[in-house]
Image (cartoon, rainbow, N blue to C red):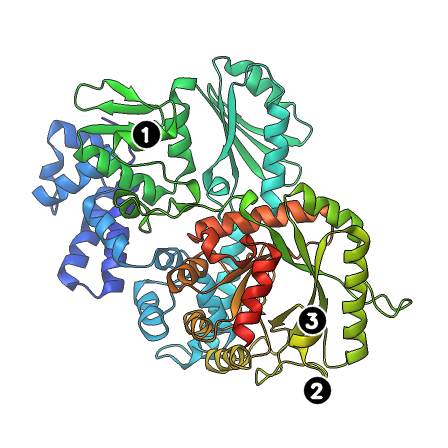
Amino acid sequence: MTYVDNGSVAAVFSRMADLMEIQGANAFRIRAFRRVAQALENLSEGVAAMLEDGTLKEVPGIGDGTIKRIREIIDTGTCDDLVQLSSELPPGLFEMLQVSGLGPKKVKLFYDELGISSIDELEAAARAGDLAKLPRMGKTSQDKLLGEIDTYRRRTGRIALGDALPQGWAIVEALQEEKAVERIDLAGSCRRGRETIGDLDVLVASRQVEPVMDRFVSLAQVAEVMLRGETKCSVRLHSGLQVDLRVLLPESYGAAMHYFTGSQMHNIAIRDRAKRAGLRINEYGVYTEPAGERVSGATEEEVFAAVGLPFIPPELRENRGEIEAAERDELPEPLSRGDLRGDLHVPVQLAADEGGGAAIDVPALIEAAKAEGLSYLGLVLPIDDTTTAAAIEAHRERVRELEQTHGFALLAAIDAPLDGEGAVQAPTELDLGEASDWVFGSVRSQLTMATEEMTARVIAALESGVIDCLAHPSGRLLGKREATALDLDALLAAAQRTGVALELDGHPLRLDLDANHCRRAHELSVPVVIGGEAKSGEELALHLELAIRTARRGWLETKDVLNCGDVAALKNWRRSRRR
């Protein structure tokens, strides 16, 4: 029987009690689960050993139903009740409980009254002053909660994917030089494309562990070796990022990749499916039960096939319907870098000494775009209420000159700010649609407006007929600025109604739209535009990679993304919606 500590089993019962309390379930049942958790924590012997020798059933409060759940938890890490409860509530609610001072009652209050289902949404509501209006809250409690959220974020120590991914690539590239390495990949939340990660997981297939670990700990990036075991080594880089290396036999590599890629809830669901088929899955392979005969595990495809499923892309593995979609053969066709034909968001600025022009190295960016397989770029001029019609016309003329000189399709695009009522700020004598090839609208001021006012403001811009696309809709900067208090569901409905596109901005601090709202855009057939907001060739490659990973997490397909089409198709789309 697998070793598991008493506290881990107790934590599952506590989690179920918390989720039931948020649901408003029967109070007697909630108390019973909490008593079980307390009893398990107070055991003087290991719960697994007591289960095996039959003495666990003698503990007061632990009956046959509890014994069954404990056995499931020891065998699989979860139980059917927790899986069911978790599927009925947004996953972010449990993370909210990790913030000091937040218990199930308050989480339930926020969820029931304001629909808050994540820490990001909770912080945005607090900054907008919405929490202070709720019963048993007030401004003092609201301000204290903001401080606790800040403490939680510092404690969790997550960093942006855009910071972690290049460091992971560098480690993979360096380790590939070791002859003993047969296969190597990043795993964990980085592989799934999560916008922030806690640490990096690197998996290596090799029959020679020591040479791989020796090369790993000797890398120039390594500041400290934290742990070195038989097959696992953990280091801290000079950047502060922790990297965990695991070395597996090649025949176990696929099972290990699946296991260490996660997510936890996806893995639990797959293991549960395997159990029903008389199989057991772990990081070493797929085995028959009870005989323990190994049947597969060299590739992830083998692992999925063992449970009757096609390969599920890593970015989708969150237990949010991907298994059911795979059963129906309805998984989205994931985007790849090669599907993207253009980047519509390359920011430029007027060069004062020339009266208008790009302040970036356009030739270098064009070459980088060609290397990425792109055939056009949108050069975006940010404007404000002081920008003149002459400056906008100068931008357009300069873009045309650059296009002619370099023989590469370029669009003269504009990024116009929205005033407090949602009106697009631009020279009144100018028709922006006629004066440019593409018009972004963006919120740059009054970022702390309440939800109702901010939502009405942005929807007014969509209904104005002026903009083609709303840039980075939530306005967040990861780790620096929270999203505005915008009702994104209402925004998506308005975008569907008006035909205005929404941007997925691949800048490492944005990744906005996020994956959840990309998926909603996919479901509503709201057009999405991918923009890199890159100012150099090096940035272009990274930002587009981040955008593609976010798009894949959001179930977007080529039909959802306007710039997966060529420049002629994009212009036709724009003309048709402006008629």
As measured in the structure, the alpha-carbon distance from the residue carrying label 3 to the one carrying label 2 is: 15 Å
Q: Quadrant of the N terminus?
A: top left
Horizontal side, residue 5 vs residue 333: left or right? left
Residue bearing the label numbered 2: 428
Residue sitting at 72 percent across and 77 percent down?
384
| Front residue of this view, candidates 205 and 73 | 205
Residue bearing the label numbered 1: 303
Residue at the right extreme, as displayed: 353
Q: Quadrant of residue 436?
A: bottom right
The three-letter code of the residue at mark 1 reads Val
Q: Quadrant of residue 218?
A: top right
Residue bearing the label numbered 3: 436
Residue 172: give x, y in percent of width and height.
Answer: 59, 29
As measured in the structure, the alpha-carbon distance from the residue carrying label 3 to the one carrying label 1 is: 51 Å
N-term mark: 3 or 1: 1
Q: What secondary structure is marked by label 1?
A: helix
Disc 3 residue crowd, few under 14, some 14–19, many 20+, Cα 10 Å: some
Disc 1 residue crowd, few under 14, some 14–19, many 20+, Cα 10 Å: many
Viewer-side label of 3, 2: 3
